[in-house]
Image (cartoon, coloured by chain):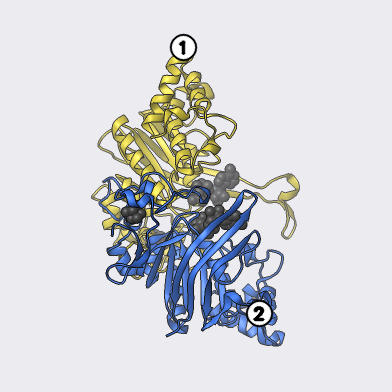
Amino acid sequence: MSHLLEVRDLEVKFALRSGDITAIDGVSFNLDPGERLGIVGESGAGKSVTGFAIINLISKPGYISRGSIYFEGNEISAYSLARMRKIRGNRISMIFQDPMMTLNPVYTIGFQMIETLQAHRNISKTQARAIALDKLKKVYIPSPEKRLSQYPHELSGGMRQRIIIAISLLADPAIIIADEPTTALDVTIQAEIMDLLQELCERDRMGLILITHDLGVVSQVTEKIAVMYAGKIIEYGPTETVVHHPVHPYTIGLIGSIPGSIEPGKDLKQIPGMMPTLTNIPPGCAFNPRCELAADICTKKTPVFEEKQNGIMAACHMK
Amino acid sequence: MTTHQTPLLTVENVVKHFDISGGFLDQLAFKGGIHLEKTTVKAVNNVSLFVNKGETLSVVGESGCGKSTLARVILGLYRPNSGKIFYDGQRIDHLSHEQWLPYRRKMQMIFQDPYASLNPRKTVRQTLEEPLRFHNPKMTAQEAVDKVAYVMEQVGVDPAWIGRYPHEFSGGQRQRISIARGLILDPNFIVADEPVSALDVSIQAQILNLLMDLREKHDLTYLFITHDLSVVRHISSRVAVLYLGTVCELASAKDLFESPRHPYTRALLSAIPRIGEKKAKHIKLKGEVPTPVNLPSGCVFHGRCVYARDRCRKEFPRFNELSNSTFVSCHGVEEGWDLG
Ligand SMILES: Nc1ncnc2c1ncn2[C@@H]1O[C@H](COP(=O)(O)OP(=O)(O)OP(=O)(O)O)[C@@H](O)[C@H]1O
Ligand SMILES: Nc1ncnc2c1ncn2[C@@H]1O[C@H](COP(=O)(O)OP(=O)(O)OP(=O)(O)O)[C@@H](O)[C@H]1O
Ligand code: SF4
Ligand code: SF4
Ligand SMILES: [Mg+2]
Ligand SMILES: [Mg+2]
């Protein structure tokens, strides 16, 4: 059976003067209609690059060096840029980490929404305006008519993020990739935005890829989690299982690091050291210098990403 | 406010407003005639709290609620418009620069951004030695280096790296160095303004463990500023919840998290994403967050509070002590309204 989205053995490299660096290395996962997948990991793990690669937004010096991406059964990673442009922002939308990648500060919200719609569809301005209003209502923006004539800077952070979600919904996409959609927002507003994204997936059977470093958010909104470390998915499985019975030592450490996972005042579980930079990835398992279970083999052989227990896939020699 | 021991720090009715009107021309406004218009940011409004020796008081609240401003007022970096601040029983808010010096070494600050807070052109040694020699003019060079090395060890940075520059360290290591700078003068009281917010969670855990460890070893008292409620629960003995520059609730961490009283505290706590717990329905707030330029009348929270009544729009609620040394500023709590 084919999935809505299938990412197979994806590798992205950046050609730097000092040589090629591998930003993501053999990433595989899939997504079905209405399903919510979380991609978590620390800064530099390769989360955003994964999101960009799906919609072929990797720009020079980066390139997809291996693997393939299937969307509705078609291999979109082989599409020309022109053909890909028809899918991007249309069938697959992305909410960027930086809101200013979506919103242009010099145009009104209405202008930007109508222009986006008319770029993809052959419709009149009046029709486009009606759709824009409808989407603003879908994300529960108060007084939507008024918003159409406002500029981005006139809106609060939470309101701006809703507008961005409304824009990503304009073409009724099958998938939304949301890269840290609430990281800059306060918790009360974050909770509202997450509710909204979840509701949209449930109601419209939209697939969601939620990229974030916040395991708390991911554990509440998604059904599946992929944990990334140094460019690889090291653990992948149902959210409940990964959160309560993680397999990979890195995931175990990451969950133990979160205040709130243990009794107040007690020492948090800490992972010694830090994630290696891409130019310094140790041989064998990239996590080995920080891992308390590391054995000889871990410094020599890269662990295979394979089925472990309870439907979890992980890459670790010892588990 | 009544307390049972003498607090190390007491803040009484502190107000800090910023005048951001700009120049004369910016202030000219035409509203049925020309007149001058003043714009003030009401960052901190009548804040009272106290910190006992050896405890960690956390100040939490959303972006722009006045946490950093309060910290700076306490450390004498800003002068309050009104109100009083006492350190160890001595009033310190109106001291001259010279009179402040002895407090400078007892009260230290750790900043949010480990990238911006360290001078990129100074080695670790220079960063740590300068305040040390300034406050201890008689110290010999050897004593100074020994002290620097000792403190570096305390925060888990290899003293062999004493000659390195900030860019040669990772974010977590840089934060350790700014903690070292905070410790070098053997302070009693440390104000830490979002010391882990810029760090990844595995590094954040290292720093939080370090801070808790140092508190015990050096008998420190912390005022800890953060917007991250899970961090607050983990490290604090007491918590002050700030909204638009006003303390809504001040309580022990246990009481606050187990039975929050103020409607804002409740909404805030219900919104924390907790790992592994199924999403509970969070309390929805109405309206938009107002700005501290147009401070609402009465209770500053009334525009977003679903329990707001007439009195809330007119009258600033008193900061009342409830039976269990919890302080709450809410008409509803005071009068026993049904708050859900
Ligand atoms: N244009 C580029 N040129 C060179 N390296 C790049 C480029 N873009 C990304 N990288 C590298 O690829 C790696 C993965 O980056 P990515 O942005 O995906 O991380 P991330 O997991 O999204 O991190 P964050 O949580 O900080 O957003 C990083 O090491 C980054 O430095
Ligand atoms: N020097 C200043 N001049 C003018 N306004 C200021 C100044 N410092 C702070 N403010 C304003 O005072 C209010 C409170 O700011 P403050 O930095 O104390 O908030 P905060 O709670 O620390 O927020 P954050 O969580 O974003 O750090 C804000 O509206 C801010 O813009
Ligand atoms: S492969 Fe070895 S080093 Fe890597 S996570 Fe497993 S035990 Fe640790
Ligand atoms: S005083 Fe009134 S508006 Fe303010 S929190 Fe209490 S009930 Fe709500
Ligand atoms: Mg990213
Ligand atoms: Mg601040």
Q: Secondary structure at mark 1?
A: loop
In this rendering, which labeled residue sits more in front, label 2 or label 1?
A: 2
Q: Quadrant of residue B120?
A: top right
Query: Mark 2 highlights which residue?
Result: A83
Q: Quadrant of residue A2?
A: bottom left
Q: Is residue B91 visible?
A: no
Q: In the depicted view, which residue is nearer to us: A139 or A317?
A: A317
Say which quadrant the C terminus of chain A sits in: bottom left
Residue at 76%, 48% in the rendered image = B25
Question: Eyeballing the image, is A166 above or below B78?
Answer: below
Residue at 70%, 87% in the rendered image = A122
Q: Colour of chain A?
A: blue
Tell which subunit mark 1 falls on.
B
Query: Mark 1 highlights which residue?
Result: B138
Q: Amino acid at mark 1?
A: Lys
Tell which subunit mark 2 falls on.
A
Place of residue B42 in the rendered image (x, y in percent of width and height, measured from the top left):
54, 49
Q: Colour of chain B?
A: yellow
Place of residue B321 in the rendered image (x, y in percent of width and height, measured from the top left):
30, 48
Place of residue B293 in the rendered image (x, y in percent of width and height, measured from the top left):
57, 53
* Horizontal side of residue B228 vs A260, given as left or right: right
Q: Quadrant of ligand 3?
A: bottom left
Q: In the depicted view, which residue is nearer to us: A172 or B225?
A: A172
Say which quadrant the N terminus of chain A sits in: bottom left
Q: Amino acid at mark 2?
A: Arg
Place of residue A245 in the rendered image (x, y in percent of width and height, measured from the top left):
27, 63
Mark number, residue B152:
none
Whole-angstrom CA distance, mark 2 to mark 1, is 74 Å
Q: Is residue B235 visible?
A: yes
